[in-house]
């Protein structure tokens, strides 16, 4: 039972390119966003009541100007001349997606307009309940901020946004930039967040909920704000572990100062992805809010570093179109790897590169790969192939030229939009090399150059050479030696996966990682290993405990009570992986706590409800399905899940409903809902 999470689906959407930026430069937005919900947050349709003022300059004489605004009811529209005089009887048109002003504007002039609107957005802003409290968060996804804030679907239009956000006094409101004031009224508070530099609209964000926060300060003096749920104070350190160290490292490595006033991170419930790099405000899935044991298996470090790197690569400089999207995701992935290398060492760094190369080769084998400069490339290509291209480029031109080029690239295009050639040109100048050969291999070839990648790794890492060399698929005589030798944990884990029957008592005297491999791959447990195998239940790894509990329960029926008693109070990850496995096993163990079985069943059913994270719910549905134990409440929760905003969970629920509908009794209940 492997704990699954979509690490590659971190943060990006379709990029839209429009032409208005050739004639107009929007410079400033000042908006008031009033969020209206009922006391429960989602029992009636929430709405946005907003006002926003935009300032722009004309680059040439034009006959119209537009702004993206989806399904909004405009209560007031005003347009002002350069001298501040309001234009009366302004002509405009609105097609439910775009508001267009029809008037002649002179070249090199500054204009303003004011909008007062009401919106009931269906995208980009999410209204949820978490443990009885309201939680609200946004996800612009490339172009959707215009569903709740009149703005620009074109990423090439960068604006300095200052927002005043009004909501209930009981909640914290977090947005881009620096908080200037918080004006508290009798029921609501208006938070004023100030930005001092321009950004693309899709990076405008807010998060509202019950939060506390702690603040560290970077070496350069930037405030680092870590938000957390009040009940999770003990999880703050393992969740945000190494943040300051990574921040300081990236500022030094990139050699360009962090470009925003502060850096905030806030976890949210049922987020669409792992994280999103909104300017100065990373929003991330609260599935990464973890304790110290979970840190060993699944932590926030990589996502944390990735979204932080985006503050330079994606937020400071933004790709002009989807063709160049790797300039955001590839850079963020590469610099996150460098930050992790600083913490975890070279072996970790090369191991991640090795695995991503294997994944890219598998993608090509499945005929699903493409060149890096394909706007429809997969996430794997944009992220991992992009990171590999940077690694290979640095190997070719050297550290000094590479770092010089990156710095110049950021300086030349700060707060602007870029294409691939903008970066390559800087590297060519810094290295005095013609990079056309590099580009044809790493950027425009239709497949990932796996052999070249592997050669680079072997040249730089004895660890990778050793891993490639060690192999027991042929079950040679050296397998036993490998398992007790000084080879790497990764190599030993590889051998255990290939020949689990060769594991001996001596192999248990190994690292946490090797013992985890034993738990996952030694599923048929010899009796002479029973005592040693039972020690796995004490490891500081929820992955190990989960696998060991199931395998021990499955192998030694006479000791099931003992194993269940020993793990009764272990919860596991945020999806309650161990607790839910425990409930399923307890329900399926004859004679075990029969007087409590109904309560255990009801607990498992309860985990299917919207009170819990979608990962928790999906796991509960999976166990109920394996037990063939859906009741009416669980089926109601499943039907509810088919309308969830997370498309992967929704897809899972729909497929399960379809499968269960083939059962006559289930079909009657499902049809009722």
Image: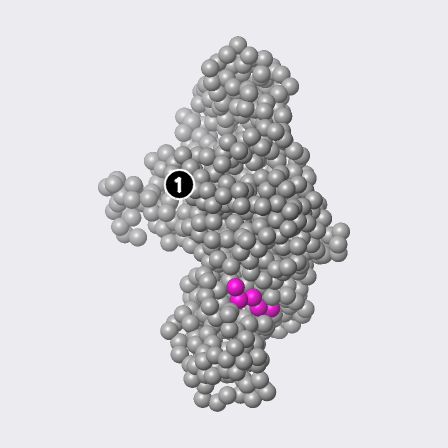
Q: Nearer the viewer, residue 16 or 137?
A: 16
248 w.r.t. 485: above or below: below
Answer with left or right where residue 218 lies relative to residue 444.
right
**Residue 655, x across and y down, in percent:** 33, 44
**Residue 512, x across and y down, in percent:** 61, 27
Residue extending farthest left: 664
Q: Main secondary structure of the magenta part?
A: strand
Q: How many numbered marks are there?
A: 1
Image point 29% across, 44% down: which residue?
658
Note whether residue 150 is visible: no
Image point 62% across, 52% down: which residue?
426
- The magenta segment: 156-161
407 w.r.t. 341: above or below: below
Q: Is residue 441 magenta?
A: no
Residue topped by disc 1? 368
Q: Nearer the viewer, residue 406 or 127?
A: 406
Note whether residue 358 is visible: yes
Image point 52% across, 19% down: which residue?
471
**Residue 490, x across and y down, in percent:** 57, 26
Circle 1: element type: loop
Answer with left or right where residue 436 lies relative to residue 398.
left
Image point 55% across, 63% down: which residue?
200
**Residue 121, x across and y down, in percent:** 44, 66
Q: How is the image coloured?
A: one colour
Answer with left or right where residue 420 lies relative to residue 594.
right
Q: Is residue 158 magenta?
A: yes
Q: Residues within 10 Å of mark 1 (few under 14, many from 20)?
A: few
């Amino acid at each position: 039972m492997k704990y699954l999470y979509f690490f590659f689906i971190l943060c990006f959407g379709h990029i839209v390119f429009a032409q208005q930026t050739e004639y107009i430069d929007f410079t400033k937005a000042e908006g008031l966003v009033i969020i209206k919900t009922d006391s429960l947050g989602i029992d009636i349709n929430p709405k946005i009541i907003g006002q926003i003022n935009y300032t722009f300059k004309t680059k040439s004489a034009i006959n119209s100007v537009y702004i993206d605004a989806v399904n909004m009811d405009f209560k007031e529209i005003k347009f002002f001349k350069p001298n501040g005089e309001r234009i009366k009887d302004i002509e405009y048109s609105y097609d439910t997606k775009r508001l267009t002003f029809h008037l002649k504007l002179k070249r090199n002039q500054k204009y303003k307009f004011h909008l007062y609107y009401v919106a009931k957005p269906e995208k980009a802003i999410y209204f949820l309940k978490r443990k009885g409290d309201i939680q609200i968060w946004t996800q612009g996804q490339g172009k959707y901020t215009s569903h709740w804030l009149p703005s620009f679907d074109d990423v090439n239009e960068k604006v300095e946004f200052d927002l005043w956000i009004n909501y209930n006094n009981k909640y914290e409101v977090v947005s881009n930039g620096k908080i200037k004031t918080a004006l508290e009224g009798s029921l609501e508070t208006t938070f004023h967040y100030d930005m001092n530099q321009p950004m693309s609209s899709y990076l405008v964000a807010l998060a509202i909920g019950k939060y506390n926060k702690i603040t560290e300060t970077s070496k350069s003096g930037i405030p680092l704000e870590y938000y957390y749920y009040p009940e999770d104070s003990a999880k703050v350190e393992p969740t945000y572990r190494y943040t300051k160290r990574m921040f300081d490292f990236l500022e030094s490595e990139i050699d360009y100062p962090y470009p925003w006033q502060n850096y905030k991170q806030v976890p949210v419930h049922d987020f669409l992805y792992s994280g999103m790099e909104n300017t100065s405000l990373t929003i991330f899935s609260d599935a990464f809010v973890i304790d110290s044991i979970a840190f060993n298996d699944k932590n926030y470090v990589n996502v944390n570093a990735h979204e932080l790197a985006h503050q330079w690569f994606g937020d400071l400089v933004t790709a002009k179109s989807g063709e160049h999207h790797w300039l955001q995701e590839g850079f963020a992935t590469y610099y996150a790897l460098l930050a992790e290398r600083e913490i975890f060492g070279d072996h970790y760094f090369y191991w991640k590169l090795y695995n991503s190369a294997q994944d890219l080769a598998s993608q090509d084998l499945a005929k699903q790969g493409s060149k890096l400069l394909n706007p429809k490339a997969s996430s794997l290509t944009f992220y991992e192939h992009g990171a590999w291209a940077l690694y290979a480029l640095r190997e070719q031109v050297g550290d000094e030229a590479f770092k010089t080029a990156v710095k110049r690239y950021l300086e030349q295009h700060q707060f602007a939009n870029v294409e691939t050639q903008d970066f390559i040109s800087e590297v060519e100048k810094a290295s005095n090399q013609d990079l056309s050969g590099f580009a044809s291999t790493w950027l425009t070839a239709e497949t990932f150059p796996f052999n070249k990648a592997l050669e680079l790794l072997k040249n730089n890492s004895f660890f990778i050479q050793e891993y490639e060399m060690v192999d027991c698929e042929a079950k040679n005589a050296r397998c036993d030696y490998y398992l007790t030798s000084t080879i790497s944990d990764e190599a030993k884990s590889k051998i255990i996966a290939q020949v689990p029957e060769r594991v001996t008592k001596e192999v248990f005297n190994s690292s946490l990682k090797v013992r985890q491999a034993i738990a996952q791959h030694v599923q048929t447990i010899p009796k002479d290993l029973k005592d040693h195998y039972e020690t796995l239940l004490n490891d500081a790894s929820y992955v190990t405990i989960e696998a060991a509990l199931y395998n021990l329960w499955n192998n030694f029926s006479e000791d099931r009570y003992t194993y269940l008693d020993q793990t009764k109070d272990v919860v596991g990850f945020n999806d309650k992986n161990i607790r839910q496995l425990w409930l399923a096993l307890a329900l399926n163990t004859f004679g075990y706590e029969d007087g409590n079985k109904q309560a255990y069943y009801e607990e498992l059913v309860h985990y299917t409800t919207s009170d819990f994270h979608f990962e928790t719910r999906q796991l509960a549905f999976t166990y109920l399905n394996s037990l063939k134990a859906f009741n009416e409440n669980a089926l109601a929760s499943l039907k509810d899940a088919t309308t969830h905003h997370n498309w992967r969970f929704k897809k899972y629920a729909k497929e399960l409903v379809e499968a269960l509908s083939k059962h006559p009794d289930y079909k009657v209940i499902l049809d009722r809902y």
